[in-house]
């Protein structure tokens, strides 16, 4: 993240606030909730970090033996943790009522909002950790089954100086420089064409709606290349129930009709922000700053090109994540997603967002091969924040419905 210092400051401020500053939850609870959230994606990097913090802040060591050793009220978070992590659109006001009305083990609304902010933060952070190659990757040829993915064979100082590490991975993947350059040029041409078309014609609301439906259905065919049967180690499984529960495509409705979440009906700016700020003071301002920061962050460059307006590309990345979670923007033309995000990038986005534990270095290397490492980290930041916002919107909407 230090490749993007402005963003990093904003991220650290909000994380410090939710973990260390005054708030509804005691400190050990905060770290245990972080562990429960990271465990949904088998993110051992984050789990280990918060196991240490949990003990340092006075947490009972016995709780680290697993969920059967923790107070019932923490156990009661299991369901909402599971749904937020994998299928947030299933969260209803009944889930909220169950948590706030369970007698002696009940949660107050401020406590629940604090817990929800932590859960969504750590689910999304697990996406960033795996997308950036920070978590160990399974490797059957190594004794303990794990090896650390290194993004390239450059040292950290090279990454910070942004030496063009893609060129190193190109040779090993048998991609010609010419291919990746033409890929970049083709993307620039498509962006230019979309800008011109935007000025020429306005699509009808009906057409926009059809394009959203098409995009959600097409995301069904963005297949997973990684192995489906992940082995969940005991140091992870002790913190979760129902480990087999995972992401299912929003568009795969079958019998039940899942209504699309129309972004205009419940927005972060008009609804979520004020609710979260009212129940857990100041966190709304910190999250809002972080969302705005990542959405507007730009250096006006694309790989070797200077003075490029990347707004269209950033919006496509953000909205594609929301699309996979069933959130639709009436004023957005989803045809742009197909124009701007090629298949290998879509596979990467879907994996990092929905099944981060399956992300591989090959996926990271396979898209935008001519782009700088810092630009790919920027993509991961956008995916992380888009995911956190999507989960938060579903949870906060359910809390709002409970209150009304």
Image (cartoon, rainbow, N blue to C red):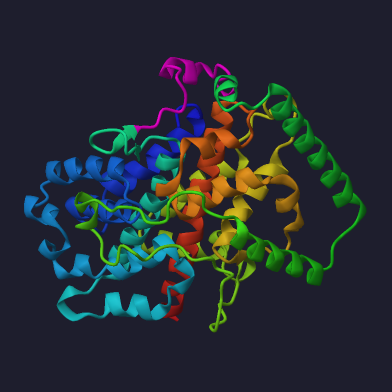
- Give the x, y percent position of residue 52: 17, 40
Q: Is residue 32 left or right of residue 184?
A: left
In the image, taking residue 280 as reference, residue 247 lies left or right, namely right
**Quarter occupied by the N terminus:** top left
Query: Which of the pair 336/356 is nearer the observer?
Result: 356
The residue positioned 81% from the left and 68% from the top of the image is 207
* Residue at figure coordinates x 88%, y 45% from the top left: 196
Looking at the picture, does residue 364 appear above or below residue 212? above
Q: Is residue 159 magenta?
A: yes
Q: Answer whether residue 304 is visible to the viewer in this image.
A: no
Task: Point out residue 96 in the picture as x, y percentages from the top left corner.
Answer: 35, 75
Q: Look at the image and tell me in which quarter the C terminus lies.
A: bottom left
Which image quadrant for residue 49?
top left
Judged from this view, the residue extending furthest toward the right is 200
Magenta-colored stretch includes residue 230: no
Q: Residue furthest front?
A: 141
Left or right placement of residue 102 versus residue 385 in this view: left
Q: Which residues are magenta?
A: 148-166
Residue 188 horizontal/vertical position (percent): 78, 35
Determine which quarter of the picture holds residue 155: top left
Q: Position of residue 76 (x, y in %)?
A: 24, 70
Q: Is residue 139 left or right of residue 362?
A: left
Residue 1's place in the image compared with 48, above or below, is above
Q: Residue at 61%, 26% (x, y): give it.
A: 174
């Amino acid at each position: 993240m230090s490749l993007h210092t402005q963003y990093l400051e904003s991220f650290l401020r909000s994380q410090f606030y939710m973990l260390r500053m005054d708030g509804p939850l005691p400190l050990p609870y905060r770290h245990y909730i972080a562990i429960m959230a990271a465990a949904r994606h088998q993110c051992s990097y984050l789990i280990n970090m918060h196991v240490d913090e949990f003990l340092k802040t006075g947490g009972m060591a016995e709780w680290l033996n697993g969920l059967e050793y923790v107070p019932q009220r923490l156990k009661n978070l299991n369901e909402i943790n599971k749904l937020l992590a994998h299928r947030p659109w299933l969260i209803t006001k009944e889930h909220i009522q169950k948590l706030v009305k369970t007698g002696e083990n009940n949660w107050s609304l401020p406590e629940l909002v604090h817990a929800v902010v932590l859960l969504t933060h750590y689910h999304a952070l697990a996406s960033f950790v795996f997308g950036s190659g920070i978590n160990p990757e399974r490797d059957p040829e190594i004794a303990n089954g794990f090896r650390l993915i290194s993004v390239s064979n450059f040292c950290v100082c090279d990454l910070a100086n942004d030496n063009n590490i893609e060129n190193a991975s190109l040779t090993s993947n048998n991609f010609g420089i010419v291919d990746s350059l033409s890929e970049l040029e083709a993307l620039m041409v498509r962006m230019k064409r979309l800008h011109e078309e935007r000025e020429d014609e306005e699509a009808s609301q009906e057409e926009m709606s059809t394009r959203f439906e098409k995009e959600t259905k097409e995301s069904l065919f963005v297949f997973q290349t990684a192995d489906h049967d992940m082995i969940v180690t005991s140091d992870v499984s002790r913190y979760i129930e129902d480990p087999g529960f995972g992401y299912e495509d929003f568009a795969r409705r079958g019998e039940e009709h899942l209504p699309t979440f129309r972004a205009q009906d419940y927005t972060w700016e008009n609804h979520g922000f004020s609710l979260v700020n009212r129940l857990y003071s100041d966190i709304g301002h910190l999250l809002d700053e972080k969302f705005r920061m990542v959405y507007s962050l730009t250096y006006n460059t694309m790989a070797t090109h200077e003075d490029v307006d990347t707004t269209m590309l950033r919006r496509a990345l953000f909205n594609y994540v929301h699309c996979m979670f069933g959130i639709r923007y009436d004023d957005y033309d989803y045809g742009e997603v197909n124009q701007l995000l090629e298949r290998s990038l879509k596979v990467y986005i879907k994996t990092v967002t929905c099944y981060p534990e399956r992300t591989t270095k090959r996926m990271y290397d396979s898209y935008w091969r001519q782009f700088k490492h810092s630009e790919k980290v920027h993509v991961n930041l956008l995916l992380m924040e888009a995911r956190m916002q999507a989960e938060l919107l579903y949870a906060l909407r359910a809390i709002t419905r409970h209150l009304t």
